[in-house]
Image (spheres, rainbow, N blue to C red):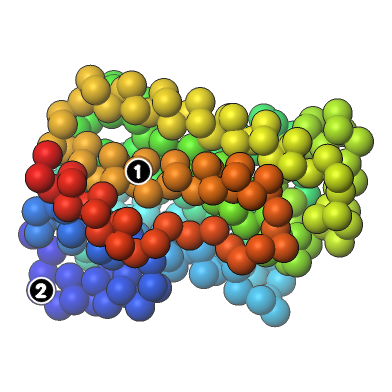
Amino acid sequence: MISPSDTAYVTALVKASGTSFYHGMKLLPPERRDAMYAIYAFCRVVDDIADEEGRDFTAKQQELEAWRQRIAGLYERGEAEDAITRALLVVIQDYHVRQDDFIAIIDGMEMDAGEPIIAPPLAELDLYCDRVASAVGRLSVRVFGDSSPAAEEVAHALGRGLQLTNILRDVAEDAERGRIYLPAEFLEEAGVTSDPARILTAPALPQICTRVAEMAEANFARAHAAMARCNAKAMRPARLMEASYRPLLHILRRRNFDYAQRRVTLPKWKKLMLAVRLLAG
């Protein structure tokens, strides 16, 4: 069990981030919830390293490498030096989560820490989604209580669906930061510029976003089908994430991917309704 002081630390970090993850994980029993908060705290810290402005890539690489070494120390020697690593050590021991998945997350953060990602090829985009989202899912399903091949498939597909939805929702914000996560092949086929300063005014942008939305929908459908072969209780948080994100695609489609409008979100009352429905199920 994670100690009360370490639980308080990772819980406070998750709560301070303002993410809906904090409330969503309350579907879980306390010990599993605290384990998920520990995983999220790790993700938050390495993501903050990648996103920190004003620091060069070499400095970020060094900090991310230090986290690779911390993860190796947890698995090889049971070494933990602070609240997050002590909490992660308990997660590793109790839920048998894999070292490779923590490393994949760090690798994904390193992709974001370097030169801005601009129109990656589809294969690179898929690798990025696997590292920053599906790897988190592979850790999560084990904490949820299902380590079956079907649960692995849920993690693979749901992570990609969630991340592609995030990419579509954040096209305008990413362009302002000099980034474009839409795939190079789609831009080239539609004759759309890969210049972040000009992409939002491209007439064919909705056409490209529609193709990415279809990729996301296919992954959500695959995840949903795999959930039917999993432990139903263990999959409640995964179903909540699917139910919270899938409607965003419908809203974006209805807007025809008009990024002049405010950022798409799901109303809090609807998130609460979804959570209640899952708890009742």
Identify the residue at the far front of this view: 254
Contact check, label 2 and label 1, Cβ < 8 Å: no
| Residue 197, picture quadrant | bottom right
Q: Residue at x 59, y 30 (%)?
A: 214
Image coords of residue 92 (percent x, y): 22, 48
Question: In the figure, 178 relative to 107: above or below?
Answer: below
Q: CA distance from mark 2 to mark 1?
A: 32 Å
Left or right? Give the position of 224 relative to 275.
right
Element assignment for label 1: helix
Camera sees residue 78: no
Q: Which mark is residue 67?
A: none
| Residue 207, picture quadrant | top right
Q: Residue at x 38, y 66 (%)?
A: 19
Q: Which residue is mark 1?
A: 243
Give the quadrant of the C terminus. top left
Q: Which residue is mark 2?
A: 4
Left or right? Give the position of 136 relative to 110.
left
Image coords of residue 123 (percent x, y): 67, 30
